[in-house]
Amino acid sequence: MSTAAITVPVTVADHDNCPATSVLRRVGDKWSVVILSVLAHGAYGFNELDRSVEGLSRRMLTRTLRALEEDGLISRTLHPTVPPRVEYTLTDLGRSFLEPVRALGLWALAHRSDLEAARTRDG
Amino acid sequence: MSTAAITVPVTVADHDNCPATSVLRRVGDKWSVVILSVLAHGAYGFNELDRSVEGLSRRMLTRTLRALEEDGLISRTLHPTVPPRVEYTLTDLGRSFLEPVRALGLWALAHRSDLEAARTRDG
DNA sequence: CCGAATCCGAGCTGATACTG
DNA sequence: CAGTATCAGCTCGGATTCGG
């Protein structure tokens, strides 16, 4: 294997079934990371979340909360009071998920000028 | 302010202009991470990349390569030979970008069973 | 207060065919 | 070999309206 490095075949197959793919797509989701970041501060109700994130519609809030719940990243607790109160909180899985996500955010901040420079070079 | 923790306002504004948002969306992009991962092995030509990733169309390959180039994550080199040869390689920025991305992939692998369990609980 | 249901435009995505 | 052009399906995301 002297110079194998120049002809590595690296065929990427089964992209959709890769366990990492669904995680990556959740990260790229427009509101998931924002909502998770807000919930990192504590429990929130539905409208509380709605008001906390500028530009977030109730529809997308509902959808995103459902998706995050199905992934086990947040938990939903219904308090049968009047009026009803629903609390969303991070699960342990959700908290641990925020760690690599923050690493990505820190990278973005650290290389912010590089990214802007690249965007400026060509439009 | 005795129990301020339960009413943290945490208003998230200006979501679209956050420097981290564009990075997160690139991560969530369907093919970006796959292509970057392939290029981590060395330089690739256009059709070489096309064949290396199952299910990737030429159209989306072109689009993704342009986007990655505009972000400064890869570089495109045209060799004016016959037939023409174009080489795509990672930039230093692209290589450093792969580090936090890999952290996310490792998280996905580490918590794979947790994620599957959550998906199984409710469909 | 906490959603669900519906409608609709915009953009992503792929198949196919064509160019230099 | 390395793309571009065009068309069609689908999903995303928002506005609005309705229900528990």
Image (spheres, coloured by chain):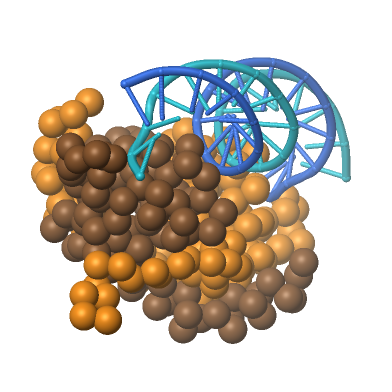
Chain colours: A brown, B orange, C cyan, D blue
What is the x, y in percent for residue C13?
Answer: 56, 35
Residue beneath the point at 21% across and 80% down: B2
Residue located at (33% from left, 58% from top): A36
Drawn side of residue B84 relative to residue A7, left or right: right
Depth order, front residue of B33/A23 = A23
> Which quadrant would the C terminus of chain A be assigned to in this image?
bottom right
Which image quadrant: the N terminus of chain A?
bottom left
Q: What number of labels is visible?
A: 0
Q: Is residue A78 left or right of residue A28?
A: left
Whether residue A89 is visible to the viewer of this picture, yes or no, is yes
- The image quadrant of residue A11 is top left
Residue nearest the observer in this picture, A109 or B53: A109
> Above or below — where is A27 with respect to A113?
above
Q: Is residue A102 above or below residue C6?
A: below
The quadrant holding residue A122 is bottom right
Left or right: D15 as drawn, with respect to A104: right
**Observer-nearest of B91 and A9:** B91
Q: Quadrant of residue B65?
A: bottom right
Relative image position of residue B22 (x, y in whole percent): 55, 63
At 43% from the left and 44% from the top, the residue drawn is A61
> Is A55 or A24 nearer to us in this picture?
A55
Q: Residue at x 66, y 56 (%)?
A: B66
How far from the left and from the top, in percent, is residue B11?
A: 46, 67
Q: Is residue B45 visible?
A: no
Q: Height in image: C15 above or below A34?
A: above
